[in-house]
Image: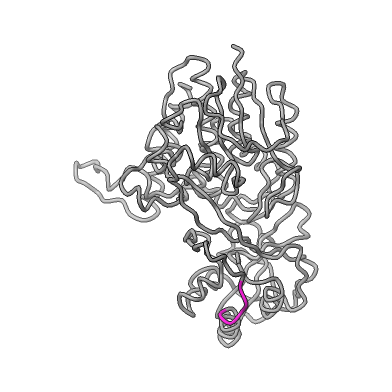
Amino acid sequence: MTQTVHIIGAGLAGSEAAWQLAIRGINVIIHEMRPHHNTPVHKTPYCAELVCSNSLRSDDSLTSAVGLLHEEMRKCSSLIMQCADATKVPAGGALAVDRNGFAQMVTEKLQSHQHIKFSYEEISELPLFSQDHWIVATGPLTSSCLMNSILRQIDNQSLNFYDAIAPVVYKDSIDFNKAWYQSRYDKGDKFDYINCPLTKEEYYNFVDELLKAEKVEFHDFEKAEYFDGCLPIEVMAERGKDTLVFGPMKPVGLTNPHSPQNKPFAVVQLRQDNKEDTLRNIVGFQTKLKYKEQQRIFRLIPGLEQAEFARLGGIHRNTFIKSPLLLDKYLRLKTHKNISFAGQITGCEGYVESASTGLLVGYFVACEILEKDILLPPSTTALGAMLGHLQDTTDIENYQPMNINFGLFPTISGEQTANGKFRKIKGMDRKRAYCERALKAVDEWVKQI
């Protein structure tokens, strides 16, 4: 076996794909344009840099779809999950990581593997007629030259949406005479989240200022189509003045120790952003406000009046293709089977989801090179459900990015009881049923691959 696999992009998907190939003995060259050519949002030269939140979301594999995906990836020897587990920071029931520590560990493991090499250059043309296999894992910030090359080959079948980044503050600038430590319903360690309470008057004043604030303007040729799971906070406020109090600023499951008799009308939470716990991410506050407006308005939050910002929020355009129309069941370009796609460019949304497609493509390409049968993950697993979304032709014209969720799984409506009657499964029991079924199926699948 002498064939080399080329991977364009060293993000979460590209890094995971490279690892899956390398551990199967296949030589890989990762083509990464950074640090010679940077993107508007990347700050380091590391692989798998997390440019938005440092959270991989819930790690509960018994009732959460994304937590289930975590566990399935662990069972598949995922590099991303291995490094996330090794660099995790307290975050209640979520899996959050030390941002730089995580990216640095991924980079070191890839650079030290005997079957992986790096080429620091920008690939500007899709290598359609290469004798080697190529994986495009350039993510939502694909360079304009390469994106134009891709568009020429796929008849311009692409879509765009906008993703916003939440600000990060220095923890020692938070006023703990007003703020306090607590996770919702006291899940996890009590230091996982810092909470800043707002009265009814303070909340509506905050919303009014959000609505009046200066925002980053789009170019005339741009159309803002946000992903609903990551709306800028000011866009949420535009949908109704009470939207935030039922969203990222909901006060449920929290008690203010400074005034336990007075329930806060709204609460802003800050999640640990690095291992040293010197930085805190304002949860759900992704934004396209101008920098001066962010500082002015976010300092209206009690406890953040003197906040110092390590990073302000930002906005960037994400690009993805119509995968159900363009890619086959192995995520190869239908017109050129030597080219596969992985990551957010395919239309998955989220860190873990992106990495999971890299895991699958790495496995698919390895099987092809090693001349082994490719076994698709069962549709009842989170891996299979995510893959199913990328192949769902139900409404291609309105194809949109998607996080993993139980709505993508084959349904479980109920079960037969001991006396032969049918019992409908609801709520948490239903989620557990999905997870139990998936974990059993993935165990069997892993044995065969």
The N terminus, quarter of image: top right
Magenta region, residue range: 211-215
Residue 71 visible in the snapshot = no
Of 157 and 242, which appears nearest the observer? Answer: 157
Magenta highlight: main SS: loop
Residue drawn 67% across and 33% down? Answer: 31
Counting from the top left corner in percent of width and height, residue 345 is at 52, 44
Counting from the top left corner in percent of width and height, residue 443 is at 46, 29
Counting from the top left corner in percent of width and height, residue 389 is at 40, 43
Of 296 and 168, which appears nearest the observer? Answer: 296
The relative height of residue 199 versus residue 286 in the rendered view (above or below) is: below
Residue 349 placement, left or right of 411: right
Residue drawn 66% across and 64% down? Answer: 313
Residue drawn 57% across and 47% down? Answer: 351
Residue 376 placement, left or right of 205: left
Q: Residue furthest bottom?
A: 201
